[in-house]
Amino acid sequence: MTETASRRERAAGTEAALKQAAREVFAARGYLNTKITDITAAAGRATGSFYNHFAGKEELLEALLRDMLAAADQQVLDLSGHDEDFSKRSAIRWHVAMYWQFYQDHLPEMVAVKQAAMLDPDLGRRLQAIMTDDDAHMIIHLAHLPNPPADPAAAITAMNALLEGFAYTWLVVNPANGQTIDPEVAIDLLTDLLHHGFAG
């Protein structure tokens, strides 16, 4: 292995360690209470090494969001059952179930995205743009409807707001008060609302 390749490998290892540490610290302390020194300490790296990879905590969060969405897109390609036809309840339910699982799997990051957007509107817009880019393919799903919406981008935004708001309420807020919901009940409720709304 050449010295250049070895340096690249070490740098990639440090970046991966910082990202994993951030996930763990966000889960333990929350995004707002996390300092860069908390992340580097959890990663076992020098504080200065952080800035070789990220300009700040905000840029790290953006990188985490991109990684999460890319992994989710790959999972959609790898799993069977994906159907683009949103006139079918089963197609909508599959996507809702995938979203619910995604939110559960990335709970600290999803809460961090929400907290960061509230704290810094500019960062919130950048994070929203990352998610909007990822949603572009969803417009194809609406083309199968008997009466496709006049503004499919707005319809996808409404769908995302429903899913995100419901997931945040039932996976973050209500559990703190001892309230839970069965995942299948949640997925079926969201599916029915979306199917009735989209397909009439």
Image (cartoon, rainbow, N blue to C red):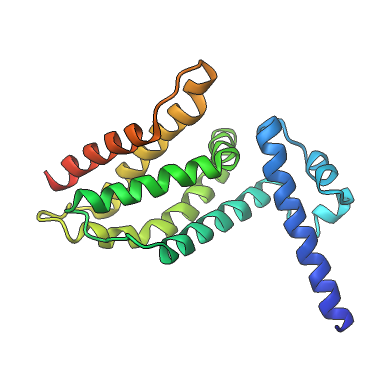
Return the residue nearer the eye: 118 or 47: 47
The picture quadrant where one finds residue 169 is: top left
Residue plotted at (17% across, 60% down) = 144
The answer to whether residue 53 shows anywhere in this view is no
Residue plotted at (57% across, 34% down) = 115
Return the residue nearer the eye: 152 or 69: 69
- Image spot of residue 13 (x, y percent): 78, 62
- Image spot of residue 38 (x, y percent): 80, 39
Residue plotted at (18% across, 53% down) = 88
- Image spot of residue 75 (x, y percent): 47, 60
Return the residue nearer the eye: 94 or 106: 94
* 107 shown above or below 172: below
Return the residue nearer the eye: 43 or 48: 43
Count of number-bearing discs: 0
Q: Is residue 164 left or right of residue 93?
A: right
Residue plotted at (36% across, 60% down) = 136
**Among all residues in the image, which is located at the extreme top?**
177
Quadrant in which the N terminus appears: bottom right
Q: Is residue 79 left or right of residue 106?
A: left
- Image spot of residue 109 (x, y percent): 59, 42
Quadrant in which the C terminus appears: top left
Q: Is residue 92 left or right of residue 37?
A: left
The answer to whether residue 90 shows anywhere in this view is yes
